[in-house]
Image: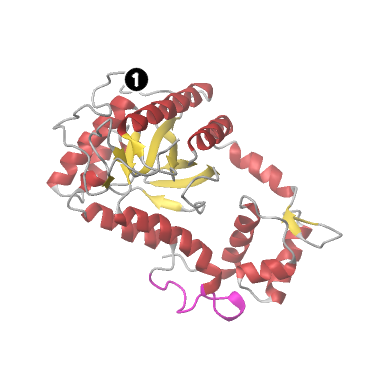
Amino acid sequence: MARPSPQTDRVVALIELLSSEGTPALTLAEVTRRLGVNKSTCHSMLAALHQRGWLARDPATLAYRLGPALIAVGHRAAEGFPALELVRPVMVELAHRHGAHCVALSIAGDRGTVVDQVRDLRSTSRELPMADIVLRPPLGALVYAWEDDATVAGWLAGESPAAREHHRRVLELIRERHYSVELATPPETRLRNLVAQLREGLAREAGPGGDEPDGGAGAPGTSIEEMVDLLAGELAAMERFHDFLPLSLEPAGEYLISSLGAPVFDRSGRVALAVSLLGFPGLVTGAEVDRIGRELSEATLEVTRGSGGTVPAASRAPGPGAPGATGTPAATGTPAAQVYRRPTVGTRSP
């Protein structure tokens, strides 16, 4: 495990704080309070970043905001993600149309990294940290649906025979309809809540002066990666794994959706971005899931084409009556789990 660097962590936390949606310019006192570091340490950090142009300071209020030097850094970073510029307007439109939270993850190997997100005020989810997520089953189905047999076998290597069988059916279904569906489950809900709480609590857990977390570096459960790994294990261990990745939904049934996702492909036909809608403000019917999923997949296919990407041969544009579509038995026709399905009453998604 890499040796912790508190100084680096403080700079990253500051940049993430100032780049958070709705965060105003902050004074030295406000930054000190929010990051949980002592005043002298915070002042030295702010002064150094201001001198390099990473921060700008209002001469009247002495409050700090992101500086002009980061514009060039952002442009340079965006060059490595050509689809991001095209997908941003799509994310804004989809998030506000459905009252949801739209997130784009950059995919590299077995990891996904949040690189952009748009959150509607009606969404029930929180802003996600810009952290790596290890794509271990059942997480990552949207990505591995487009990989070769050997890569998929490696992804499923640690799973039980029953889980491997189910996940392979899910991958086939994703290729056929071009979007993924994840239902909310207790471990998965815990994962999202704890990641958000962890991010907010890092400053509160800092020791005197903010130099080291209480309990020392590497204390169990203090990193986002450890949290994701632990709870992904809980998801994988669920006896009824189809509760999270369903093979079919009833058109008239109402479901608590964790996420709907669709891929953006690069020039080689691999998933470059995974674009997901989450945090829907209410229950969603199976028919609505299919409609929104197709809308999302059509949008990401347009982004793929616009950015010069290649849609894999195994893929095809979604259309009515696709095998395994919502309400149609896929593979064995296993219905979505009843445990997390709500009665046909209550708040409805717009």
Q: Is residue 298 left or right of residue 230?
A: right
The residue closer to the viewer here, 126 or 230, is 126
Q: Position of residue 20 (x, y in %)?
A: 61, 52
The reply to whether residue 174 is in sight is: yes
The residue closer to the viewer here, 248 or 161, is 248
Q: Residue at x 27, y 58 (%)?
A: 234
Q: Position of residue 99 (x, y in %)?
A: 50, 39
Taking the view exactly as shown, the residue that stands out farthest to the front is: 345
- Which type of secondary structure does the marked residue at label 1 adopt? loop
Taking the view exactly as shown, the residue that stands out farthest to the right is: 60
Magenta: main secondary structure equals loop
**Is residue 236 on the magenta stretch?**
no
Report the quarter where the N terminus lies: bottom left
Q: Is residue 325 above or below residue 123?
A: above
Residue that badge 1 annotates? 316
- Identity, as a three-letter code, of the amino acid under mark 1: Arg
Label count reads: 1
Q: Residue at x 27, y 21 (%)?
A: 322
Q: Is residue 165 above or below residue 317?
A: below
The residue closer to the viewer here, 306 or 326, is 326
| Category of crowding for the residue at label 1, using alpha-carbon neighbours closer than 10 angstroms: few (below 14), some (14–19), many (at least 20) | some
**Is residue 208 on the magenta stretch?**
yes
The reply to whether residue 5 is in sight is: no
Q: Is residue 210 left or right of residue 255?
A: right
Q: Which residues are magenta?
A: 205-220
The residue closer to the viewer here, 100 or 46, is 100
Q: Residue at x 67, y 70 (%)?
A: 32
Which quadrant would residue 80 be assigned to in this image?
top right
Q: Residue at x 43, y 46 (%)?
A: 112
